[in-house]
Amino acid sequence: MSAAGGGGSTPLTDRVPAWSLTVASMFIVQFGSALSVRLFPVVGTAGTSWLRLTWGAIVFLAVARPKWRSFTWREVRWPVLLGIDTGLMTLAFLAAIDRIPLGTSVAIEFLGPLTVAVIRSRDRRALVWPLLALVGVVLLTEPWAGTIDPVGVLYAVIAGTGWGVYILLTQHVGDRFTGIDGLAISIPVAAVVAAFVGIPQAWGHLDAGVLGLALITALLMPVIPFTLELLALRRLTAAAFGTLMALEPAFGTLIGVLVLAQIPGALQLLGVAFVVVAGIGAERIGHRGEPARFEPPGG
């Protein structure tokens, strides 16, 4: 999942390779997802989503301090829509990893941005990539074994749809807002969306330990990864960034092994490889040109 923004890099970030920022972001996202699993038995998946997004909103608002009066509804509607999508996507993804392995969830979810890349390419030959990814997902889920959770797969598909929409909306927000102002609007909206189902699950189970762990997971996603992606996108083309993000299903599988002891079989590893190759192939032909950027009045 990516964020876009503007501004110049500091001398410190100039000395750090842009690709390494993206790779670090992917590792942190998947580690944060794995760590979130510890909150599920206490506050539920929806409660975890709400807590993570709420802490993230507090951090982004404190850092960005957006000038609300300088924005009109025409500008704000895009980060609001992005926030709604982010909230629903987060709820669906955490519900998915509660039922099926992390690597499988990420691979299925990645079908969303993969489809977006193929559609933007307008090349019929690009249809080979989602087909290859679909084969990979079938190898990952092994439906012939009868062990896959169909509800978990459905949640992952919903999250993937949300991720595809997220990319399109993020482009609009990145074109219209500099810095992290767009995130300071969208993440609080996402927290409100998650609150409708998250508060009933979490209420009565909140204590210092739960709130502290939720803050840590919020820093791991969305705060630190979105910031790293902002820095990376200032020096990477959209195509290069998208190609790197295609490695995320592999990172999800790796973190699932290291943190959650979710050991994939040989066919499942082959499935991950298919999804990664499909993502790289699609992203190489699915990037767009340089957007025309502008700042909101008074921004």
Image (spheres, rainbow, N blue to C red):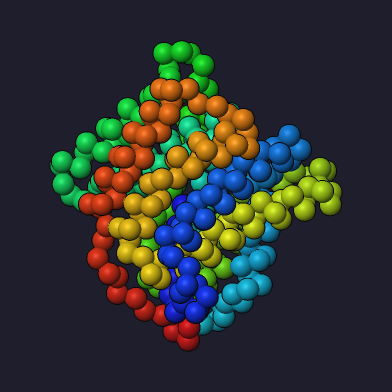
Residue drawn at 38 percent across, 52 percent down: 244
Pick the residue in front: 108 or 68.
Answer: 108
Classify 237 as above or below 292: above
The spot of residue 234 in percent (x, y) is 40, 71
Q: Is residue 104 above or below residue 282?
A: above
Report the front residue among 202 and 254.
254
Residue farthest bottom in this picture: 298
Locate residue 218: give its quadrant: bottom right
Residue at (34%, 76%) from the top-left corner?
293
- Percent across and percent down for residue 120 are 24, 52
Task: Judge left or right: residue 118 versus residue 98.
Answer: left
Quarter of the image where one finds residue 174? bottom left
Q: Position of residue 226 (x, y in %)?
A: 52, 61
Residue 189 visible? The answer is no
Q: Nearer the viewer, residue 56 or 285?
A: 285
Q: Name the outermost residue toward the left.
A: 124
